[in-house]
Image (cartoon, rainbow, N blue to C red):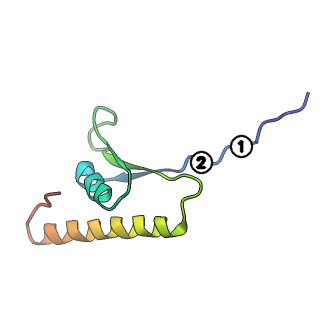
Amino acid sequence: MKDHSLGPKPPAPIIGLLTSTPHALSTYLLGKGFIVRPVVPPTVPAGEERVRVCLRAGIGRDVVKRLVAAIEEWTRLQILDVTEGVRAKL
């Protein structure tokens, strides 16, 4: 009998962005047009909160670049808020 399996499967294209404020990050990214979801307790243990980003075949390089740029922008905003002593309200 022939083996019709496709061989080892590539790793899942799911990226977990670890953050203590997953709702704020996911809200920010949703506002930029990206469909992402916060993953929070009780789904994951406290301290392991994250935002789940699922990539799929066919996503263009430009979309990935825009996603990375949006994450970088959010991170810069968080750093600015911390250094100014103000908590982000997203």
Q: CA distance from mark 1 to mark 2?
A: 9 Å
Q: Is residue 52 above or below residue 5?
A: below
Residue 13: where, in percent of width, then height?
Answer: 54, 50
Circle 1 crowding by C-alpha within 10 Å: few under 14, some 14–19, many from 20: few
Q: Dot 1 corresponds to which residue?
A: 8
Residue 54: where, in percent of width, then height?
Answer: 47, 49
Residue 81: where, in percent of width, then height?
Answer: 14, 68
Extreme residue toward the left, this view = 85
Circle 2 crowding by C-alpha within 10 Å: few under 14, some 14–19, many from 20: few
Q: Residue at x 38, y 70 (%)?
A: 69
Which quadrant: the C terminus? bottom left
Q: Residue at x 23, y 53 (%)?
A: 24
State the mark number for residue 11. Answer: 2
Q: Residue at x 15, y 67 (%)?
A: 82
Q: Of helix, strand and loop, which one carries label 2?
A: loop
Q: Of helix, strand and loop, which one carries label 1?
A: loop
Q: Is residue 60 left or right of residue 85?
A: right
Depth check: give the residue in front, 37 or 85.
37
